[in-house]
Image: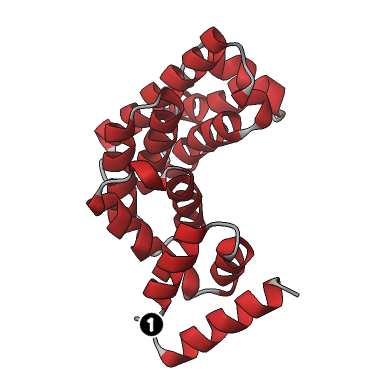
């Protein structure tokens, strides 16, 4: 039992040692190979968060094509490995969608966005990440993915931080403006008032 506990503990902390704390260290680690996660939710979140940070960073976006492709493939492998064990892991589906965007695979982006929303409907922080990804690719979304996007907008409109995000982007994108208005009109009068107040505040 002691040996088994030691192996488990080592597998839990290995991703932290492998990826480091800085973005450059994470990029080096993720271009070199997939990071194995431990069995716990915390360890899985750690390696997925490393992928999220690396793929979304300016440094990650300007990598040489070969290095960026390696990073994307490794993050895809990590997300899908976790999903093989936990098929309802919404953050792993989001990382799969994020990687698909980087690879120009819009079929997979749509599928993974929908599944991420299905399994993580109430996670406001993740709804915001999905909304940002959907906003960048709205012209390539399927009707099902657009419905998932609108459900995320509804989730965001129900929280202070979410309303602030929507309000800050409301006048920057015509599609978001029309879509958010349509979604908010289906919410309670109180949430509608709070949303209008957030938009007005953001424009001051």
Task: State the quadrant of the C terminus.
Answer: bottom right
Q: Is residue 32 visible?
A: no
Give left or right: position of 82 versus 50: left
Q: Is residue 72 visible?
A: yes
Q: Residue at x 53, y 36 (%)?
A: 52
Position of residue 42 relative to residue 181, above or below, is: above
Frontmost residue, 66 versus 118: 66
The residue to which callout 1 is attached is 187
- Coordinates of residue 168 in the picture (x, y in percent): 63, 64
Frontmost residue, 62 versus 5: 62
User: For the residue carrying disc 1, how many other residues have a C-alpha within 10 Å: few (<14), some (14-19), or many (20+)?
Assistant: few
Task: State the quadrant of the N terminus.
Answer: top left
- Coordinates of residue 72 in the picture (x, y in percent): 46, 21
Position of residue 25 relative to residue 47, above or below, is: above
Q: Residue at x 61, y 75 (%)?
A: 199
Where residue 175 sits, quadrant-wise, is bottom left
Where residue 39 sits, quadrant-wise, is top left
- Coordinates of residue 155 in the picture (x, y in percent): 42, 68
- Coordinates of residue 108 in the picture (x, y in percent): 29, 33
Position of residue 187 relative to residue 74, above or below, is: below
Position of residue 188 relative to residue 43, above or below, is: below
């Amino acid at each position: 039992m002691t040996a088994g506990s030691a192996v488990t503990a080592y597998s839990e902390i290995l991703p932290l040692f492998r990826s480091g704390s800085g973005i450059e260290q994470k990029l080096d680690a993720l271009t070199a190979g997939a990071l194995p996660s431990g069995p716990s939710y915390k360890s899985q979140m750690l390696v997925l968060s490393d992928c999220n940070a690396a793929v979304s960073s300016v440094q990650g976006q300007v990598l040489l094509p070969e290095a960026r492709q390696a990073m994307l493939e490794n993050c895809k492998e990590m997300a899908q490995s976790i999903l093989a064990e936990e098929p309802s892991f919404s953050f792993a589906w989001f990382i799969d969608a994020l990687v698909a965007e980087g690879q120009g695979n819009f079929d997979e982006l749509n599928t993974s966005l929908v599944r991420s929303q299905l399994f993580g409907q109430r996670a406001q922080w993740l709804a915001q990440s999905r909304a940002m990804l959907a906003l960048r690719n709205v012209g390539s979304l399927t009707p099902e993915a657009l419905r998932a996007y609108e459900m995320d907008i509804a989730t965001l409109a129900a929280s202070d931080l979410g309303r602030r995000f929507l309000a800050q982007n409301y006048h920057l994108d015509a599609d978001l403006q029309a879509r958010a208005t349509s979604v908010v009109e289906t919410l309670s009068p109180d949430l509608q008032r709070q949303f209008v107040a957030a938009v007005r505040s953001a424009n001051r």
